[in-house]
Amino acid sequence: MAEVTTTIVSPNRRQIHIRRARLACESGNESGQSWMVDHDVVQIGALKSGDVVLTDPTVSRRHAEILRTPSGILLRDLGSTNGTFVGPVKIKEVFLVPETRFRCGRTELVFTPEDEVIDVTPSVLDHFEGLVGSSIAMREVFGILERIAPTDLTVLIAGETGTGKELASRAVHARSRRSRGPFVVFDCGAAPDNLIESELFGHNRGAFTGAVDARPGVFELADGGTIFLDEVGELPLELQPKLLRVLEQREVRRIGASVTKSVDVRIVCATNRTLREEVDAGRFRDDLYYRLAVVELNLPPLRSRISDLPLLCEHLLGRADHNHGVIELSDQVQAIFQAYHWPGNVRELNNVLERAIPFSEGDRVTIDALPQALRAAGKTRRIQAKALGTLSAQVAAATDRGGQFAERPFKDAKDQIIEAFEREYLLDLLERHQGNVSKAARAADMDRKSITRLMKKHGIGRPS
């Protein structure tokens, strides 16, 4: 069993608590053998694809399972022929405590928790597979990925659109023991609702209108590797129990089929929603969330790691296929990038750079190569800086004149400063929009009448 929780221990220290367990065989054909288990669901039985394989002839193919639940670690009999016992008591299901002895058929097993607490320290590297960043936030992400990638733990990656959730999932796969197996992507938000079940689990020929051939689903295609379920929060509520069954039983049944097929896959999923809120709102199953969020990794937005911009730009420019030698940004572009909000995160940054390369001359991205929206945003910030600069200069000048500014009543001094700011801001705003009051009002997020009133107040007429 593996449960991972991240807690803030102190402002400078984070920990990951990994709950694992060991099953040891005390008597039976596998006596002396033990298994470290770190799956959400551990299958015990004679079936060779199980986690704990017992050759005892009194053990059923699917004899019992151990699963992690919000209330504790549960041992459950799966309708075995010869039963599962704790002491002399035959059980259907029971919660396990440390050193619990139980018997499957004639084989006796001992359950022992082997928890591990890991200090999360920022990685010394400024990259992890396709992810790039030297900020503390990103190096902490790398530190967590270094720990969890080699395991089989289910991972839920949360973050805004464009933060690199698929790159993180590919990094988990690349650093795992499954790296030579398939990596299959399925976007839960892109497939039509009536085809999602077929895409996930496959279908037999004739299972529904249009099913002219049998087709495997993405779980079968990912067998032996990793499946990445993107935007898992978009999965329709009626299909969530079927996904939960695959996670717990690790087997799929195609639409129209009467038999199931075992699959060995690691699940990595992503969402830009807050799934806990989706659970509270009744749009996402609590038990499915619990299965998916064994490790929950949050990718920071670009605006919270602006210090990564130079490294990211170098990386993105270097990998662009059509780059003819552009390697850096002009000072103006750097200033605009540093101040921009980046609602589309790294994906938006990459798109901006890809678009700018053909319009750049020499080895630099210049302001003329940027999209109009970014150029306008840069000009707005320059206007605001100029207005604030004028304001500061007037305060300094008034103060230098024998302290006259500070000697005035507070309200008068404040009104003087506000009027100076209003006039400077308004002049630059109207200049930028060629005197168009409606456009100026929209850009300043003000009412058109307010702009007109300020123009009249400060004696500013429309340009001819």
Image (spheres, rainbow, N blue to C red):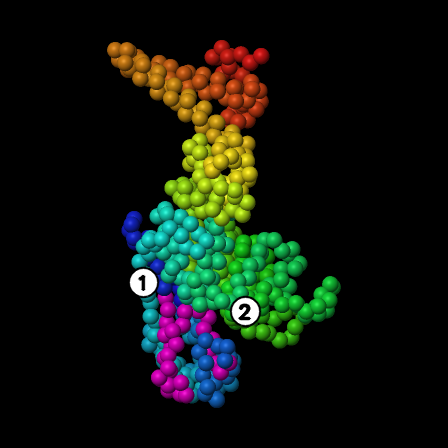
Amino acid of disc 1 = Val
Q: Residue at 56% across / 19% down in the picture?
A: 434
Given the current orientation, which residue lies at the most extreme left position?
A: 402
Compare residues 27 and 341 and report the one nearer the observer. 341
How far, Cα to Cα, is label 2 from label 1?
Answer: 31 Å
SS at badge 1: strand
| Left/right of residue 315 with respect to residue 246 in the rendered view | left
Q: Residue at 44% across / 78% down in the picture?
A: 52
Callout 1 crowding tier (Cα within 10 Å): few <14, some 14–19, many ≥20 = few
Q: Which residue is mark 1?
A: 117
Res. 436 visible in picture: yes
| Left/right of residue 150 with respect to residue 361 in the rendered view | left
Q: Position of residue 60 (x, y in %)?
A: 50, 84
- The answer to whether 52 is drawn above or below residue 127 in the figure is below
- Dividing the picture into quadrants, the one containing residue 108 is bottom left
Please give the label number shown on residue 223: 2
